Image (cartoon, rainbow, N blue to C red):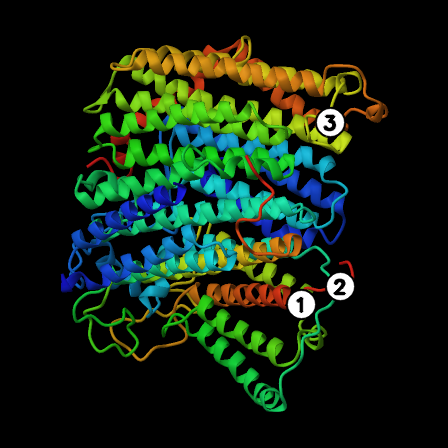
Amino acid sequence: MNKKIGFLAFAVVFVFLFLSAMYMHPFGEPNEKDMDNHFIEKGQNDTGANNIVTSVVFDYRGYDTLGEATVLFTAVTGVAVAFSMAYGKKKEMKEMSKIVRTVTNILYSFIIIFGFYIIMHGHLTPGGGFQGGAVVASAFALLVISYSALKIKGILKKENFSVSECSGLFAFIALAFLGISTAFFYNFLAGGTVFGNIPAGINPGDLNTGGVIPLMNIAVGVEVLSGIGLIILYMFTYGKEAKE
Amino acid sequence: MIQHFPFIAVVILIGLGIYACMFKRNLIKIVIGVSLIESGVNLFLITLGYVKGGVAPIYTNAPGTNMVLPTPQALTLTSIVIGLATTALMLSFAVLIYKHYSSIDAKTRRLKG
Amino acid sequence: MNFLLTHAPILIIALPLLGAFLTPLISRLHPKMRNIFVLTILIFTGFLTMLLTRDVLANGIRVYVLGAAPSTLTVPTGSIMPVRIILETDALSVLMAMISVSLAFVSALYSSKFMENRTGLDKYYTLLLLLLAGMLGMELTGDLFNLFVFLEITSISGCALVAFYTDRGESAEAAFKYMLIGTVGALFVLFAVALLYGEYDALNIGYLASKIQYSFLDKIALVLLVGAFAMKAGSVPMHMWKPDAYGEAPASVVIMLVTSSLASLYALLRVCFTLYGNVLNTAVVGWIIIVLGVLSIFVGVTMALVQNKFSRLIGYTAVAEIGYMLLGVGVGLASLTNGSIEDYGLKAVQGGLFHIMNDALDLGLLFLVAGAVFYSTGKSDLNKLGGLAHNMKYTTIFFMIGLAAVSGLPPMNGFASKLIIYETSYQLEPLGPILSIIAILSSILMLAVFVKVFHSAFLGPKLKEYENVKDAPRSMLIAMGILAVFIIIFGLFPDTVINTIIKPAANALIDYQGYIDKIMGGV
């Protein structure tokens, strides 16, 4: 009886959504484009970044990005609360074979450098703080998997990650506060001296542009890499630990 | 019909996700269902912005100036990070439930009535 | 002072965020410093909220554009529509913001003693500040995607706080259920926002309200938004998470969870009245909301009769109280035709909004009393408690005040708001008297439920195991006292409260054209 009602409700919702898909505008021909035309035409002049998506994420809708970074911070805190109990015996996690460990030794520094390259060039090429931070965190995951989690505990410490996460997020909101004489999240460096050139039209890309956006990219990148690194460490190393 | 094909794919993904959420009993499968719904909504956001013949909205060595809409890509970026956060938290609650009840079946519960 | 006033909308949200980011660093110094830091941030936020309230009540809606050259430039030069995120605060937003900040302050004061013996408290206070920031972000914003992001912040921090007692399996289960329902609801909200964006290429609520037509896709978006926000507010048929989550979370957290479901109710009102204000088929949608409200009242009260656990019982009455708010607002919506509302409809909306304020105070006091009983005796099963009135005198008095307020007895505030709801729902055209009768009967049942609780927990002979039980510590008593004082004041002078704050809020809710004009510059 309960299952039948469930199936009926599911079928109703599915038909509902299917009808909405049929009534949408054809794929590739959006109805109106006023707001996005403003972003594409005036984006370079207002913000100084070549990558219009990054200028939307960090300048025009930067407040949403602050909310998103806060969501990641909240989730990391929630994971810390959930794993705060001392759990049973320490599970013995075996380390991987010699081949895997050798390849890891060579590769992990390149992955970290690649991640930082993506973070720094967020305003010129596809990328930015979030993407680059996730790449660097995957290097940490590689280290944790190929050496067993217990050997890594001496190198990757939770307290360091926690401090760097808080400082990255604090730097982000401080950059937003610095423009408050005009408005919160005002891009006060565009057209100035530090990171201040304004590009125009199609160009090969100059690192010295973007106003306050490259600094925000670095802050968010540090926060994301520490946050995801913390989640990885909490999930891999739960076992009886000394009380913090 | 063929011009709505990406939207139909979105609806199928979301439908599969809701099915897994509602009718599966293993907690991990329920989390996979939520992840499917997220992927469906992210796909929906991205396909909203496509312009026929458009290129990526980046001016560095761009092949032209007919660009796709940049706003849905920004919204999808935010949504993916939020999805990561909720999946991580739900999985850690599943681990906590396993620690207490030694099973991840959704039918073993103590809260009733 | 002018600087603070211009930037008040964003400072109200950014201060708790800043506090939350700094709390893990400050708590390495000393626990007392962390408590003082949190209370200071809350006092500053409360001060800014009162400043903003005074200004909005005197001068009308205030906008704040994030990142624009003067911060009130909504439509940039050379464009016909707003492109940045705009915070738009009208009288209803500041009413909800005042409720949220006051209850957060009471909760922080209460938890300084209630949670004293637990570890991991820096994460507790961080999550508390983040929950407050999420609620304030939802209540002050004028942008749909921003509403979704802060809805997620509220939902995730609420879930993490529900699971705070990690040594009990039931908490983890309640948290998982709450998180599942919260995430699926928020994803439906995102789907609806994407639908609206795909049609009109805009995310600003004011701009969308001026452009919206009632096409098929808009109807689907309306159904998804109303369904998802009703799910997060906890009305039937998606109410099952409420008794679980309210029963398992620490008492000082539950008072914030109550406020967060009120914030979701605010978002529902914003969507129905402002976003779709121009084109809504008010009779149909109004009656659907009325039906949801009446079902919630009925189910909530009947399930509360059979509960044994103290806070779970109050959780079911919370479901019923949301029903009263939906009933009041639904009657107002159903009597709204062509932008002009009947007299009793406006009073119904005022009753619903007044009940939002009263319900936060009443349920808050009841949950804090349940927490005080748990703190002193260590038990929460009603069958095992008894005779506590001998030892815990102040707590008993507070419970009597809360009982009278929730059941709608004079001279408490619950009586004033419920009376307005009874009167106005009686006047609705078909079936009005039946709604009124159901509401009155449920109030009487609720009185019966709470008298039973009072008898079994507080009255009766002194039990042997509770001989050395002392009353709650002083800071917890002060926190409960603040709520009790407000309940009595609002009960004795309802007219002053309604004329000062509730009437402007109801007028701002109905007046969607004023909301649009502030964004589009009066074109």
| Side of B26 where C513 appears, left or right | left
Q: Kindly identify which chain the residue marked by label 1 belongs to.
A: A
Residues at discs 2 and 3 in contact (Cβ within 8 Å): no
Q: Position of residue B55 (x, y in %)?
A: 23, 72
Q: Which residue is mark 1?
A: A237
Q: Is residue A228 visible?
A: yes
SS label for mark 1:
loop
**Dot 2 amino acid type:** Glu
Nearer-the-camera pick, C502 or B102: B102
Q: Position of residue C260 (x, y in %)?
A: 50, 37
Q: Kindly identify which chain the residue marked by label 3 belongs to.
A: C
Q: Residue at x 63, y 34 (%)?
A: C107
SS label for mark 2:
loop
**Dot 3 amino acid type:** Lys
| Mark 3 → mark 1, Cα distance in angstroms | 41 Å
The 10 Å Cα crowd at callout 3, few under 14, some 14 to 19, many 20 or more, is few
SS label for mark 3:
loop
Q: Which residue is mark 2?
A: A241
| Side of C87 where C218 appears, left or right | left
| Side of A24 where C419 appears, left or right | right
Q: Which residue is mark 3?
A: C384
Q: Residue at x 73, y 68 (%)?
A: A90
Nearer-the-camera pick, C452 or C395: C452
**Dot 1 amino acid type:** Thr
